[in-house]
Image (spheres, coloured by chain):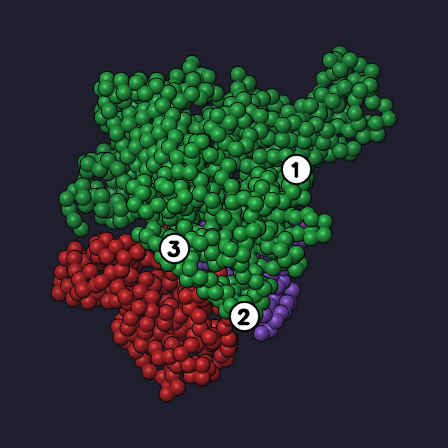
Chain colours: A green, B red, C purple
Amino acid sequence: MTETPFTGGIVGESRPRREDPALLTGEAKFIDDLQIPGALWLACVRSPHAHARITAIDASAALGIDGVVAVYCGDDLADAWEAPLPCAWPVTDDMKNPAHYPVAQGKANYAGDIVAVVVAESRYAAADGLEGVVVDYEPLDAVVTIEDAESDRVVIHEDCGTNVSYEWPLVPDPDAVEAAFADAAHHVTETFVHQRLIPTAMEPRGVAAVPAPHNGNMTLYSSTQIPHILKVMAAITLGLPEQKIRVIAPSVGGGFGCKLNVYAEEVICMALAQRHGVPVRWTEGRTEASGSTIQGRAQRQTIELAADADGKLTAVRATLLADMGAYLQLVAPGVPLLGAFLYHGLYDVPVYSFTCKSVFTNLTPTDAYRGAGRPEATYAIERAMDALAVAVGVGPDEIRSRNFIPTEKFPYDSPAGLVFDSGNYQPTLDRAKELVDWDGRRAEQVDRRAAGSTTHLGIGISSYVEMCGLAPSRTLAALNYGAGGWESATVRILPTCKVQVVTGVTPHGQGHETCWSMIVADQLGIDPDDVEVLHSDTAISPLGMDTYGSRSLAVGGTAIWMATEQVIEKARAIAAHMLEANADDLEFAGGNFTVKGSPDKEVPLAGVAFGAFTAHDLPEGIQPNLQAQVTFDPSNFVFPFGTHIAVVEVDEATGAVELLDYAAVDDCGNQINPLIVEGQLHGGIVQGVAQALWEDASYDADGQCRAANLADYLVPSAAECIDMKLDYTVTPSPSNPMGVKGIGEAGTIASTPAVMNAVVDALRPMGITDITMPASPMTVRRAIEVATGGAS
Amino acid sequence: MIPAAVDYVRADSAEAAIAALAEAGDEAKLLAGGQSLVPLMRLRLATPSVLVDIGRLDGLSGISIEGDTVGIGALTTHSTLEHSADLAAACPLLAHVAGQVGDPAVRHRGTLGGSLAHADPASDLPAAVLALGGTLVVAGPGGSREIAATDFFTGFLESALGADELLTEVRVPVSTGGWCYQKFNRRAQDWAIVGVAVAEGGAGVALVNMGSTPMRAAGVEAAVAGGASAVDAAAVAADGTEPPTDNNADGDYRAHLSRVLTERALTAAGA
Amino acid sequence: MEVSVTVNGIARSADVEPRTLLVHYLRDVLGLTGTNVGCDTSSCGACTVLVDGRSAKSCTLLAAQVDGADVTTIEGLAGADGLHPMQQAFHECHALQCGYCTPGMVMAAVSLTDEYDDLDAAGVREGLEGNLCRCTGYQNIVAAVLAAGE
C-alpha cells in the first residue's frame, strides 16, 4: 500500500489559501462583475404554469418599452439549434429523452420553462421588458408527484408515450436474493423519501457571450463548473465549429453540482450574440433560479435488509423511484446510478439487488447535487441499519461493528461489482463515539426519560463509504456515460525556475490553486508561491473534464503529480549531462540535483531550467524546455469513509429539533492541506444537516414551488449551526500514487442520516420509527401527536 | 429582481411629506427605512408611482421618557431601540423585541414607525406595542391625532393610517413588570411562525402571525386578570383566532404553538 | 436624479433613476463590483456594506436613500499596509471558500464587532443571522470573527 510519496515538508501542512486575498477584497471577478462594453442584457419570460400549451405570444408592448431591443419566442429561435440541449448519460439504450429546446416550442413543461426572451440595452430595461410580453396559455393537468408520473395518468411528453424515462437493474443473482430473504431471521423493510433540494450556490448563475463577428470566434463566460464539457456541448447544440469557441469560467461562487450542466441561457446568449453581433449577457435572479437551475434528490426509496439471527447481513435489496423533472439535464439519468452500487454501505454483504425507475414530472429538472446518488444510498442503508439494530435487539453501534467489511478483506470485491480500494472502518466509529461521549450521552438520555423530561435526547450514527474520483473511463463506458473520466495536467518550469501548472479541473471554492501549488512545490523542492496554477479557460487549458464527483485531487491532482515527476526525470537527464554523471547516480532533493557519493557535485533546478531554456548544450535527443503534459485515466474510483454522530434535542411541546453536538471522523487517505479538508467537511456536513432539518423545495398541487426564494427556502445561517468536532484516520488509497481520496461530498453524504437517526432515536420510545424530511417542528409535532394519541 | 420605475420625492418636513402624499394620491408610498417596502418593490409586488422619502426628517427620531410615558419618534431605528439603556430600563420588552427583528443590518435601517405602519401580522414590534397598550400619534392635513394600538391594525397590511397621514410618534407606558417575548421560528432571521409578547405579568398579551393582523390575546389577558394559572390562561390563547397556513405551519399547529408559547411567556413573566 | 455618496472616502456623484438600488449604483455605476447580490428577498446578506459605519443590505436600499451618506464597501476595507484585521482573520482561519458571500460577511462582521461588546461564539452566530454562506458551515467564520476581536 502506498504510504506517502511526499518528502518536501509542504504537503500535509495546514496552509491558508492563496485564493483568499482577491476574494476578501473584492478584487476577484465573478461573472456579473465583468465589464463588457456594448453588451445587451437578456431576460427570460418563464412559464408561470407547470404544464401549458402556449397559444399566443404578443411582444408588441415589450418592444415599446424604452431600451428593449428585441423579443424572441421558441419558433423565432428554432433554427438556431443544431441539436436540443444535451443529456450526456443515456443510461439504457431505450431511455426516453424528449427534445429539450432552450426556448419552449408550443408547450411549457414546468413553471420556469423559458417561453420567450427579451434583449435590452440594460439590466433594468430587460426586467421591464418581461412585463410587456403577453403570453396566452392553455393550462394542462400538471404531474407533480412521482407516483402520479408513474401512473401515466397524464403523459407529459406525448412522443415518449410514457412518463417513465428508463428502468435500470443491478441484480447480479436474482435467485440468491430470493433465497437470502426466504432464509432471513430478520427482514427489515423501510421506505424513505428524499425531498427536492435547491443546491443554492451563493452566486446565482450568469452568462456572457462575446462574439467576434468577423473572425467567427465566440467567447463564452459562464459561472460554470464545466467549461471544457460546455465547450463541446455548445458546439454540438449550436452547430458552431468547436475550435472557434472559448469558454471561460471566471471566479465561480460555488457549484455543488448545480453548475455542472449545459443550460438554456448559455446557448441562448451565444445564439443571440451571433445574431446581434454584440455581446449578450444574463444574470440569474435568486427567485428565478427555482425555475432555471437544476434541483437535487427527489427520490423515493425502499430498502430491505435480510440478516441472520445475530444481525449479520445476508442480503440487501433496494428499489428506487426517481424524479427527473420535466426534461433530462446533462447527467440526470446517471444520478441514481452513482448510488446504485452503495446501498449496502460499508457492510460485508454477499447478495445484492438494486433497481431504479426514473420518471418525468412537470417540475424543475433535477440533476447532480452534492453527493449525487451517494447521499441517498447512504441514507437508506444507515436508516435501515438502525431499524435492524432494533429488530435484533442490539445497539446501533454494535449492529454496525458486526457488519463492517473486515479490514483484511481489502481490496474488497463488493456484491455490486466494485472493488473498494482500502478501508478500516471500526476505528472511525470508536473515535466518533469518544468525541460525543457516547456513554455519557446514553446515560443522560436514560435519565431524562426516567425523569419524564419533555426535551428528549437523540443520538444518531451514520457510517459511510462513498465512491468518488470520477472516474475510470472504461467504467463510465460500461454505464453508458457519454464521455471519459480522465484528467489532464501540464507542468512547465519557466526559465527563471518559476512554475506554471495547467489543469483541466475547474475550481469554484475548493482551493485548488493552493493545493496544486503545494503538491508541485513539495515535489520540486521549491516555494509554493513560485507555482502559478492556470485553469478554467479552454484557451489556456484546452484539455479537461472539470470538477464534480470529488474528482479534482484524485484524478486531476494525480495528473499534476505525474507531470511533475516527468519534468523531474527530464531535468535529471539534463542535470546528468551538466554534471557529466550518470542520470541513475543523481539524487534530487531540496531543489538540487547531486551526485550520490559526491555531494559537492550539484546543480540546482534553477540551473537546469535555464539550461533547458537556452538549449545551448542539451543531451542528445532531449528537447528544449522543462515541460510535461499528462492525461491520467484512473484505474478505479476511490472510496473515502467514516463515521459521523449527531446528538439532538427534541422539544416535545413544539416539535423543534436542536442540534446539540456533532462529531465526524473521516478517512480520505493522505491529506494535501488539512485546512481545506476541514473546510470541505464543515460545509458538507451543514448541507446534509440542512436536508434533515430545514430545506425543502416543496411544490403545490399545481406545480408551483413553495420555497422559491431564500426567505422561504431555509438555507441555515450561523445562528442555526454549531461547532463540529472533526477527527481523521488515514488509510491511503492504493489506486493513485499520492494515496489520496476525495472529500468534497463526504460530509453531505454522512450527515443527513446521522441527524435523522438521532431524531428518530429521541422519539423511538413513543413508537415513532420514521420522520419525513425535513424534520420541521410541525412534522415532528404531528408525529408525536399521532404516536401518543394526544392531539394538541 | 429590479423595482419598477418610480418617482421620488424627498420630504424635508412632516408637513411637506403630508403635502406630497396628498398631491400624489393613492399610488404614493411613504419610504422610511425601506426594509419592508424595498423588498416588495424588488419582486414588483409593490409598484407605487411615487415614493415620498421621509427617512431623514428631523425631529421624528429619538426616545424620550416623561413621567410614566415613553415617547418614541416614528423614525427611530430598531437598532436604536435595541441599544437604548433608557428604554431597557423603562420598557425592557420593547427594547428586547426590537433586537429580535430581522437581522442587524435590517435593524440598522428599519424604523419603529415603518414596522407599525406596514401592519404585518408576522412582525414582532406591533405585538410588543399592543401588549404594552401603546398609542400611535399620526399627523395629517388636518393636524395631529392619536390612535390606540388596539384600534390601529385593521386588516392584512392595513391600518387606520389615512393615505395622506404620517405616523410621527409611538407612545407606550413605562412598563417594568414581568415581561417576555417568545418568538418561534426555524431560522433566527425569519419572521416568527408564532410569537407571543407579554407585558406586566400578563396584563397585556399579544400574538404574532396568528391572523390577518397583529392582535391582542384578550381572552388570555382576562384569564390572567381573573387569577388563572399560566397553563389555564394559555389554553385560550388561540380562541377566536384564524391563524394562516404556510410552509412552516398550518392553522392547527399555529394554534397549538400559540398555547405552548403563551404558557412559556406567562410563566417567564411571572403570571 | 443626482445621487451623491462618499464611497470609501471618495465623493462620488451620478445621475440615476430613482429606482436604482444602492448595490447597482455601486456595481454598475461606480464599478465597485466587490459587493455581491445573492438573493432578491433581503435574506442572504451578500450585498452588505457599511452606511455611516453600520451594516446595511445594499440590495434593500435605494441609492437615493443614502444620498449624502458615507458608504464603505469591501474595496475600502484593506489599507495601504494590507488587509483589515477582519480580512486577515478570515484568511488565517479559512473562513471562506468560494468567496461569494465573503465581502458581505466581512462587512457584517466588522459592523457586528463594532456594535456589540464582548461577543462570544453564540453572539457572533446570532449576529451573523442575516448572512448566508453555503461553503463553510460557518464554523471558521465564527472563529475568524472571534479572532479578529482579540
Q: What's the residue type where badge 3 is placed?
A: Ala
- Name the residue tied to disc 3: A52
Q: Tell me the residue that label 2 is attached to.
A: A64
Identified by mark 2, the residue type is Gly
Crowding at mark 3 (Cα within 10 Å: few <14, some 14-19, many 20+): many
Instruction: Tell me the kind of residue under disc 1.
Output: Ser
The residue shown at (37%, 41%) is A161
CA distance separating discs 3 and 1? 43 Å
Sequence-wise, the earlier of marks 3 and 1 is 3
Whether residue B159 appears in this view of the structure is: yes
Residue occupying image coordinates x 75% and y 15%: A583
Q: Residue at x 47, y 56 (%)?
A: A115
B131 or A223, nearer to the observer: A223
Are the residues flagged by discs 2 and 3 from a single subunit?
A: yes
Secondary structure beneath disc 3? strand
**Residue A113 percent coordinates (x, y):** 45, 52
Residue A125 screen position, x and y as percent:
55, 65
Looking at the picture, does residue A179 appear above or below residue A652? above
Q: Is residue A218 left or right of residue C98?
A: right
Chain ID of residue with mark 2 = A
Number of the front mark, 3 or 1: 3
Cα–Cα gap, marks 2 and 3: 27 Å
Name the disc covering residue A541, or none: 1
Point out residue A138 in the picture as x, y percentages from the top left corner.
37, 58
Decide: is A603 above or below A694.
above
User: Within 10 Å of the Cα at label 2, are there few (<14), some (14-19), or many (20+) other Cα atoms?
Assistant: few
User: How far apart, in angstroms, are the residues tagged by discs 1 and 2?
Assistant: 44 Å
To which quarter of the image does residue B45 belong?
Answer: bottom left
